[in-house]
Image (cartoon, rainbow, N blue to C red):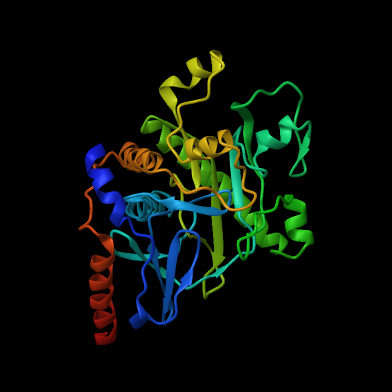
Amino acid sequence: MLSESNLYAALPDALAGVDLPFLGARTQGKVRDIYRHDDRLLLVTTDRLSAFDRILGVVPYKGQVLTQLAAWWFAQTQDIIGNHLLDVPDPNVTVARLCTPLSVEVVVRGYITGVTSTALWHQYSLGNRTIYGIEFPDGLRKNDALSTPIITPTTKARDGGHDERITSAEVVEQGLVTVSIWEQVSAAAIALFTRGQTLARRGGLILVDTKYEFGLAPDGAVVLIDEVHTPDSSRFWIAATYADRIAAGQEPDNFDKEFIRLYYVAHGYRGEGEPFPLPPDLAVQAAARYIRTYEMLTGESLAPGAWPAGPRIEATLRQWVVGMERR
């Protein structure tokens, strides 16, 4: 694993973005810079870190971890549902089928936790017992396991806005997807989460909750898109210490970006207005956790790509375009 000194040294060159005019127009998401090439999408995963639907800063090697970990998970779950992945020509680049995204994010939760406005615990702590159209009993404590995983959809944030809570019934009532597609998506989401929990436990982690995105392939098939079971889209806890820490009234040991959310909340920021910049020490801690999560889940060491990543990505994609033109 990369040492702390390596991560500090890499911080100034962390990948904030890529501008590749030879690929055409660029679309920027929270974390990815996206280009279209014929019927393919080129997803360049940067080192940008977002929380509270805001970009806080950059985390060295984060983009590589997300790209390679998502590819690993796609391989582990392709028997459950197909996905958009075609190739990973560079540690930070995903070549994907061009799909039409569904207008809803599918969040699956196995525990009651979280500090954001859409989190179960935040709503429950305010006294709400009907959340996302689901009834919750009194007496639950933060970080308790739910009796069964549940789906809590959100709308997709646009133009810097926040994700908004919605019920499964409203997903269909508002015409975001058809009944048949939502039934297929819901079944796939629970199956994906169950597989994710099993494989995470094998690596010593608890998959607490996660976000899935689905789309329609050109043939109309529902497929998994974006990423799956990464520290960006999921919450992970250390399995070995969970019970003892809960019994002691402590927060679980987390191996995702939740500790960054907690840091910001402790310093008075919950997502309203502009956030303060991500402190360098926090960025390095995040990098170490992302890398360690990858290694625990996959059982493999992360082999860092050539650094800085920007020139490497440009060279790789120029070669990729030439190769496509020769076909």
Q: Residue at x 62, y 43 (%)?
A: 270
Q: Is residue 119 above or below residue 41?
A: above
Q: Is residue 93 above or below residue 229?
A: below
x and y percent of residue 193 in the render?
A: 52, 43
Q: Is residue 243 above or below residue 11?
A: above
Q: Is residue 128 above or below residue 64?
A: above
Q: Quadrant of the C terminus?
A: bottom left
Q: Is residue 169 left or right of residue 78?
A: right
Q: Is residue 249 left or right of residue 257?
A: right
Nearer the observer, 295 or 273: 273
x and y percent of residue 243 in the render?
A: 50, 18
Q: Residue at x 38, y 29 (%)?
A: 204
Q: Residue at x 37, y 73 (%)?
A: 19
Q: Residue at x 77, y 43 (%)?
A: 133
Q: Hey, which quadrant is residue 139 in on the image?
A: top right
Nearer the observer, 237 or 101: 237
Q: Quadrant of the N terminus?
A: top left
Q: Hey, which quadrant is residue 74 in on the image?
A: bottom left
| Residue 208 visible to an observer of this rendering | no
